[in-house]
Amino acid sequence: MKHLMITLPELPYAVEEAMNRLRINIKFCGKNTHKILLTSCLPNEGKSTISAYLWKMLAEAGFPTVLVDADLRKSVMKHRLQIEYDKDMKGLNHYLSGLAEYDEVLYETNIENGYFVPSTQLLENPSVLLEDVRLGELLNTLAENYRFVIIDTPPLGSVSDGALIASMCDGAVLVVRAGNTPKAMIKQSFLELEQAGCKLLGTVLNRAEVRSRAYGKYYGKYYGKYGSAQLYRN
């Protein structure tokens, strides 16, 4: 298996604690919950950052976990993980196109128990590829071999990709930006997940300012950059 070196900056204490609570909640979602989609209503709500740190924390907690970068249109995961993709590197886009196989797109990382399936080339219209049976086969194979499969997808309110991928997952976490995401968009996202047959595991309220004396100084300084992550279960 090929190896990738990734880098994720350390989080401020309060944000790390919030992410740990999210990790614990995910762990208690049930033994049959393997394929977990992370999405949002709109762009720039922090879903990719939360996907990356959730993946890292689950892996470091001893759970073999794969992060799948399924945002084939506007992926930012390369920058989040600070990876350099070389021209010969194979990714999800190659797999779905039939130009690579399973073992060519799955990478071991320097995070113990952490594995990664990248998207190495952005596409203008990947819907046809996402509808191919190969995606479902890939996700099912990953779920058989690893405890968690974290799938980062485009926002539900932007394109249909997220709902399509949701139909192949065991559950979804919806990232909502505090004070920014319209309630109507949140309700619409809930409906899309329901129509896709994907169970909503909970909602992460991101970039929420916490007024606790103990944590206030951390959130006051950092919440605009990193955000908090709190899972509200349904």
Image (cartoon, grey):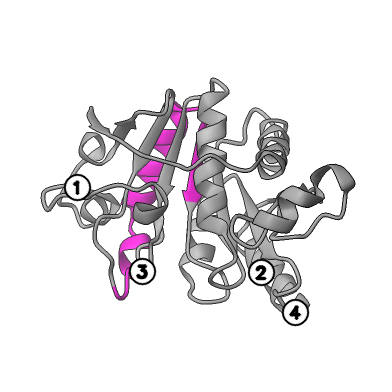
Identify which residue, 190 or 119, lies in the foreground.
119
Give, as a three-letter code, the residue at label 4: Ala
Q: Are marks 3 and 4 in contact (CB under 8 Å)?
A: no
The residue labelled by disc 4 is: 184
Under tag 3, what secondary structure?
loop
Secondary element at tag 2:
helix
User: Residue 90 has which mark?
Assistant: 1
Mark positioned earlier in the residue sequence (1 or 3): 3
> Mark 3 highlights which residue?
73
The residue positioned 53% from the left and 72% from the top of the image is 43
Q: Please report whichever mark, 2 or 3, sits nearer to the chain's N-terminal start.
A: 3
Q: Which quadrant holds the N terminus?
A: top left
Of the image marks 3 and 4, the number of the one nearer the N terminus: 3
Separation of residues labelled 1 and 3 (CA atoms) = 16 Å
Query: Magenta span has 234?
Result: no
Which residues, given as a range, are shown in magenta?
124-151
In the image, residue 152 above or below residue 170: below
Observer-side mark, 1 or 2, equals 1
Front residue (pair 137, 39): 39
Q: Of marks 4 and 2, which one's residue comes earlier in the chain? A: 4
Question: Residue 144: image x %, image y %?
Answer: 45, 29
Residue 178 is left or right of residue 5, and the answer is: right
Extreme left residue here?
Answer: 88
At a point 21% along the width and 53% down the height, the residue shown is 94
